[in-house]
Image: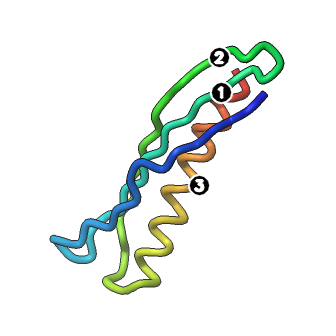
Amino acid sequence: LLLSLSLAELFHDDREAPGNVRIEVSAELTDRTERRLLGRRGFVQEAAVESDNAEGAVRAFETAVAKLLDELVGWVER
């Protein structure tokens, strides 16, 4: 199987400090031997930024990415 990921959005919205982060990924799962698309799905996660600095944004992105990967793994394992 081949899992292809495409990053659609990686965004820190700080209009209202400290803001929130958003990550959006599209995924395609393909059977390489049969050259057949098994599934396609988009994944989106957001997380609140807890402190108004780069470290706070990085921690929020870590949280959002971890949640997104957990959701992605569940989808692939089905």
C-alpha gap between disc 3 and disc 1: 20 Å
Residue at left 78%, top 13%? Answer: 34
Give the SS element for disc 1. Answer: strand
Q: In this view, does 57 lie above or below 63?
A: below
Residue at left 23%, top 72%? Answer: 14
In the image, residue 72 lies at what x, y percent?
A: 61, 37
In the image, residue 41 lies at what x, y percent?
A: 50, 28
Amino acid on which disc 3 is placed: Ala
The residue at which mark 2 appears reads as 38
Image quadrant where residue 15 sits:
bottom left
- Check if mark 2's residue and mark 1's residue have beta carbons within 8 Å: yes
The residue at which mark 1 appears reads as 29
- Where is the N terminus found, in terms of image quarters? top right
Left or right: residue 57 compared with residue 13:
right
- Check if mark 3's residue and mark 1's residue have beta carbons within 8 Å: no
The residue at which mark 3 appears reads as 66
Residue at left 68%, top 35%? Answer: 3
Amino acid on which disc 1 is placed: Leu
Left or right: residue 50 compared with residue 2:
left
